[in-house]
Image (cartoon, rainbow, N blue to C red):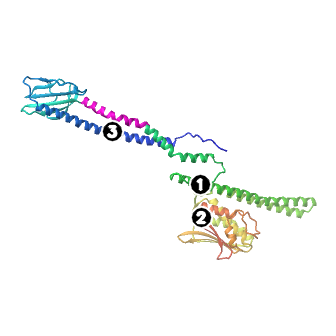
Amino acid sequence: MSAATPRFAGPSLQSRLARLLLGLFAAVWLGTAALAWFDARHEVEEILDSHLAQAAALLVAQPLPADAQARIDTPVLHRYAAKTALQVWADGTLRLRSTTAPVTALAPHSRTGFQTVQVGGQPWRVLVAAGAQPGQQVQVGQAVAARDDVLWAMFRSTLWPLLLTLPLMGLGIWAVVRHALRPLRALGDDLHARQPDALQRIPDEGLPREMQPMVEALNLLFARIAGLLSGERRFTADAAHEMRTPIAAIRAHAEVALRANAAGDDEARRQALARTLAGCDRATHLVTQLLTLSRLEAEGTAAAAAAHEVDLTALTRQVLAAQAPRALEQGQRLSLQAQAPWPLQGDEALLAVLLRNLIANALQHAGTGARIEVRIERLAGERTGLRIDDSGPGLDEADLERLGERFFRPAGTRASGSGLGWSIASRIAQAHGLRLQAQRSERLGGFCAVLRPA
C-alpha cells in the first residue's frame, strides 16, 4: 500500500536555510555596497579637488585685465560646468570672475586651501590659493550638489547590475538548498511509506555525512523495537502455554471432585478440591509474576530513577523475617550476616520484590533441612554486595547459562514455580544499576546468587 507524501504545518527547513543564506548574502551585499560608496565618494572628492586645483593654477598663470571685475566668458560645455565658479582677487578687489561666480567672495580671504562654505544658501567646495603677484588671490569653487550628482551617476552604473543579482541569487540559493535537502525528503518519504511492522534497516550508503547519525539512530531504534516485539510475541506465546497447565490441572481436579461428589466419596472430593485450590494458587502466582514483569518492562527504569534512598540491609532483614516461618516449616536454617547498612537509591517496593524472589527461590529449591546464608559484605573498591548461598543441589553449567530465560525451569525440578522469578529479579536489578549473577556456591556447595553494583 502506498501513501501520499504528507503535508505538515510548521517551519520549513528548506525555507529557513534559504532565508538565512539570502539574508547573509544581502547583508554582505549591503556592506560591500556601503564600502564601495565611501571609497567612491573619497575618490570622486579627490578627483574633483584636483580639477579645482588645476583651474586655480591656470588662473594664477593668467595676467589680470586692466578693468575691474572683468568676467571670463566660460561656455557651459558640460552639465556640471554651470555649478563651477572662478574668482581672482587683487588687494581685496574682485578683478576677474566667471559668469557663474557671484560678485562677493566665495570664501573668506583669510583662509587658504580647500574648505566647504555656504554660497547662496547652498554648500560649495572652494579652493582659496595665493596668486603669482603680491596681494593676488584665486578662489575656485564647485557646488557640492554637482559633486553628489557625479558620484551618484558613477555609482548607479555599478549599482544596477548588483541589484539585478539579488533576485537571481535568491532563486539560485533556493534551488541549491532544495537540491541539497533532497536526500532528507527521500528519507521522509521512505519512512512514511513503510508499513507499521516494516522494521528493516534503512540503507545508509551514499547518504550525506550529516544524515548518517540520524539514520544510524533510526536503525538502532528499529532494531530495539523489533527485539521488543519479538520478545513480546514470545512472552505472550510462552505465557499462554504456561497458563494452560494450571488451568488444565484445575479443570481435571474439578472433574474429579464432581465424580467423587456423585459417588458420595467425601475424602476423594476433599482431596480434589484441595488440589483445585492449589492449582488456583499456582495460577494466581503466575499471573502476579506476569503482571510484575509487565510493569518492569513498562516503567521499571523510570520508577527506579524517581525513587528515594533505601537501606538494603534493613529491607533484607524485613524480607527474611517474612520468609522465616516458611523456612521453619521446611526445617531449613535461614541466617543473615550484615556488616553495615547498604544505602541505595531505588524503589523500595521493587527492591523488596527482588529480595523476596531470590530468598524464596533458595527456600523452594534448596530442599528440606538445607542451609540458606544471606550475607551483605564489602566488596573491592568500597562497594557493597549481597550473596545468597544454599546447600541444595544447585544447577549445572548448562542450566546456569540458561537461567534468566522466561519460563525456564531446570529439568528434574519438582518444586512448583513459574520460571519468571529470576527474570523479574534481573530486571529489577538492572533498573537500579545492579547486576545479578548466578554461580555455584563455594561455601555450601549449592546455588549462589550474587547482587552487586554494575
Q: Please name the amino acid that badge 3 sits on.
A: Ala
Q: In this rendering, would 243 be left or right of 51?
A: right
The residue under the point 72% across, 65% down is: 408
Q: Which numbered marker is on residue 219?
A: 1
Whether residue 447 is in magenta: the answer is: no
Label 2, on which residue? 434
Figure quadrant of residue 259: bottom right
Q: Main secondary structure of the magenta part?
A: helix
Residue 431 screen position, x and y as percent? 60, 60
Nearer-N-terminus badge (2/3): 3
Label 3, on which residue? 34
Task: Characterize the local packing of mark 3: few (<14), some (14-19) or many (20 or more) Cα atoms within 10 angstroms.
Answer: few
What is the CA distance from the residue labelled 2 to the residue labelled 1?
28 Å
The answer to whether residue 373 shows anywhere in this view is no
Q: Please name the amino acid that badge 1 sits on.
A: Asn
Quarter of the image with the N terminus is top right
Q: Secondary structure at mark 1?
A: helix
Q: Nearer the viewer, mark 2 or mark 3?
A: 3
Report the magenta residues as a range.
144-167
Q: Is residue 106 above or below residue 6?
A: above
Task: Characterize the local packing of mark 2: few (<14), some (14-19) or many (20 or more) Cα atoms within 10 angstroms.
Answer: some
Task: Characterize the local packing of mark 1: few (<14), some (14-19) or many (20 or more) Cα atoms within 10 angstroms.
Answer: some
